[in-house]
Image (cartoon, grey):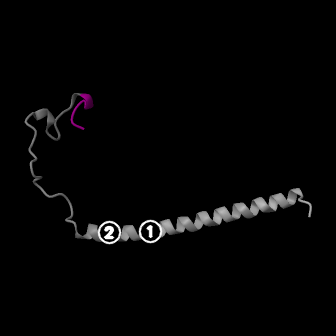
Amino acid sequence: MVWKPGHYLLLALALYSLVVTLGFSLRGRQLAGLRQEMGVLSQRAALAPEGYVLPLPGACLPTRPENLPGAPRPYRKGVS
């Protein structure tokens, strides 16, 4: 049998379809693993306390008035 250009094209198309199919199946397995991991993380997050716990251990207010929240800042030309 003599190989013609169409035969090479069909062979290349078959190899390409095989590579794409394997890529999609691998991606599906990765997606299933990530969904399972998200389920575990969401269960862990449900057990964690919500919001911030105040006062924070070891936290203190700044001593300089320029560093207090809402203080006027020269680079902002005021408060906002």
Whichever of callouts 2 and 1 sits on the residue coming sooner in the sequence is 1
Residue appearing at x 48%, y 66% in the figure: 31
> Seen from this angle, which residue lies furthest front?
1
- Which picture quadrant has residue 41? bottom left
Residue appearing at x 16%, y 36% in the figure: 71
Amino acid at pointer 1: Gly
Say above or below: 64 vs 34: above
Q: Give, as a single range, the part of the protein colored magenta.
A: 75-80
- Which picture quadrant has residue 25? bottom right
Q: Is residue 5 left or right of residue 50?
A: right
Residue 68: percent from left, percent from top:
13, 39
The answer to if 78 sits in the magenta stretch is yes
Amino acid at pointer 2: Ser
Along the line of sight, the residue nearer the viewer: 10 or 54: 10
Q: Is residue 17 left or right of residue 50?
A: right
Q: Is residue 46 left or right of residue 17?
A: left
Q: Quadrant of the N terminus?
A: bottom right
Residue appearing at x 12%, y 52% in the figure: 56
Residue hosting label 1: 33
Q: Quadrant of the C terminus?
A: top left
- Which picture quadrant has residue 73? top left
Q: Nearer the viewer, mark 2 or mark 1?
A: 1
Q: Main secondary structure of the magenta part?
A: loop
The answer to if 24 sits in the magenta stretch is no
Mark 2: few/some/many CA within 10 Å (<14, 14-19, 20+): few
Residue appearing at x 87%, y 56% in the figure: 5
Residue hosting label 2: 42
Mark 1: few/some/many CA within 10 Å (<14, 14-19, 20+): few
Along the line of sight, the residue nearer the viewer: 70 or 46: 46
Residue 70's mark?
Answer: none
